[in-house]
Image (cartoon, helix red, strand yellow):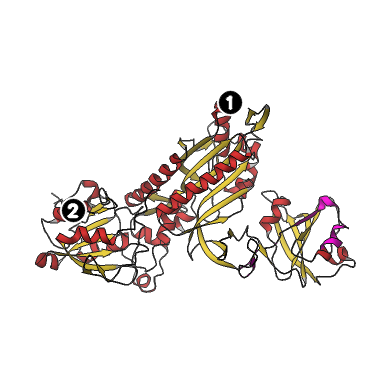
Amino acid sequence: MHKQSKRVAGDSASKLSWMLLPTQKATKEQTKDNSASTADILTKAGYIHQSSAGIYTLMPMAQRVIAKIEVIVDEEMQRVGGQKMTLPNLLPPENWKKSGHWDSVGEELFSLKDRKKSTLILGPTHEEEITATVKHMVHSYRRYPLRLYQTARKFRDEARPRAGLLRGREFIMKDLYSFDVSEQSAMDTFYTMEAAYRRCFDRIGVPYAVAEADSGSIGGSMSKEFHFVNSAGEDTLLECKACGYTANEERACSKVSAEGEVDIYHGNVLSENGAVVRQCKAVIPRSCQPNVIKIKQVWPVAAKEKLEFALHATLAGNETENLLESIGYKQDAHSCLLIDTSISSQMANAVKNSVAAEALYLGDWRLARAGDHCVECQHGVLEAQRAIEVAHIFYLGDKYSKPLDLCVRYQDQNKFVQMGCYGIGISRILQAAAECSNADGRGLRWPLSIAPYLATIVPLYKTDRVSELYDKLLNVKVNGKQVFAGNIAVEDRDYLSAGFRLYDAQLLGFPVTVVLGKKFKQTSEVEVQLRVPLLEAPQQIAGVRVEGDGYEYRAFVHVDKLSEFLACALKGQFKEVP
């Protein structure tokens, strides 16, 4: 009969021997040059398991992280009146076609046919479904405002799934939808939700930035993104340190000199088979690039069409003679001329007088760059930083209520209900937080608020004193709370070597590891290892000498002083709920 390992202190849920935890050692090459991706580390640490391209199983450790993120989000959503519900994942396409979302999402939409040959889609988002639900159930302005949300699995047919949970085909997301009877009320909701999101990320504890953003296929007139700042991010943010202005480079505006030469770009709208459908010209300052996203907001392009630009000519900034001929613009029903507002007024006026108003667009049509002056404060300089998007909030207006005819009688008028959409990538936060806490290559360093366990006890030899250490940890109070209650993992896998168990504690990223080694047997001193993000430990804590390298700190602490030591070490590390 197989002999089971001896069970030690703590309930079964906290014993690692009970847990499905398929950890693996890193290769020598990855250990040497820290080359493993965060998705690889999460896999080696037993947090995730890849089922197929872009689809992952969340293992028990990951599920604990997800649960803690969801608790924070639930508390903050309900604090601002959010009502939690569950919407179906299988959706009919009719309302998507009415809203135009069916075409704008394009090939990223998973669709299937049931046995009756009816088309269904796997929802990547739920604006249409929630709008139809509210339309069916709410018929008086007295029932507004409404804030309805869910946390659910979403689906997106990524062309190139990559980077683990950051660019997958199935993901967990919290989405809240707001309904208001007026634009002013909807804008108040937008800023209320922005504040709620800031509280969520303050509590999660990873440094973040809030940036003005493009609304993409969701639509709406205003949106903001929340990002974890990290060099591995796919997004580039432009920030002015002088005034705090921050925007995604797709949306960012900047100030450049109106003097000097201008570049003329020729734009082609290409159909799915590559044929030229429409053409345009863009006049922007020399050495700048056209901003396709901004241009498509005023000159829409179908989902299956592509807008491409190529440099056509360079002109002197003060040139006005035969300007349209120099630009190469020929006016017809399918063309337009885009003039960047930063070029000289002399040239802009010459163009305005020669082009029909409906074909002329004046605005900011160039990509802002690091080094440009800030458009907000005028004197600051924009700086670039890479970041990982983890949340996005939108003011939708009547983007969905109008095509789906969600109206309300208010102030003696029938008005379209004003909507907002507020999404947080729950599973995305898991990997993004791990990405931001893996700087030393030895393992993860979870923020205290979402760590699967706050502490682990690792006995390196057989001892009956584990329960004593367990109780010492339970007695630790920070801000009056027993922070380790329900958050202690006991490393009772005595069938593994001591080295492997210590390696696992580092790899898994537990903030506190208490090691019972030779000193404990001799002098009742335990080795305490602290892997806490943003912790700047002094040379002494509670009179105990501490050594470390900025990523991990170690100290030998007598068991009788353990509670005091940890209370002092972690003081100020837990975010209070305001």
Q: Position of residue 248 (x, y in %)?
A: 58, 59
Query: Which residue is disc 2 drawn over?
Result: 470
Nearer-the-camera pick, 154 or 248:
248
> Alpha-carbon distance for marks 1 and 2?
57 Å
User: Is label 1 in contact with label 2 (beta carbons under 8 Å)?
Assistant: no
Residue 44 drawn above or below residue 52: below
Q: Amino acid at mark 2?
A: Tyr
Left or right? Give the position of 377 relative to 51: right
Q: Position of residue 158 (x, y in %)?
A: 54, 52
Q: Residues within 10 Å of mark 2 (few under 14, many from 20)?
A: many
Q: What's the residue at 59%, 54% (across, down)?
A: 213
Q: Is residue 396 visible?
A: yes
Rendering coords of residue 466 (x, y %): 15, 55
Indicate whether residue 369 is drawn in magenta.
yes
Residue 140 numbered mark, or none = 1
The amino acid pointed to by label 1 is Ser
Region rendered in magenta: 348-373
Residue closer to the observer: 396 or 12: 396
Q: Decide: is 94 above or below 540.
A: above
Mark 1 crowd level (few <14, some 14–19, many ≥20, 10 Å Cα) = few
Instruction: Indicate whether residue 269 is drawn in magenta.
Output: no
In percent of the image, x 33 and y 56: which residue is there?
46
Reading the chain from its start, which is encountered first: label 1 or label 2?
1
Is the residue 189 above or below the residue 272 in the image? Answer: above
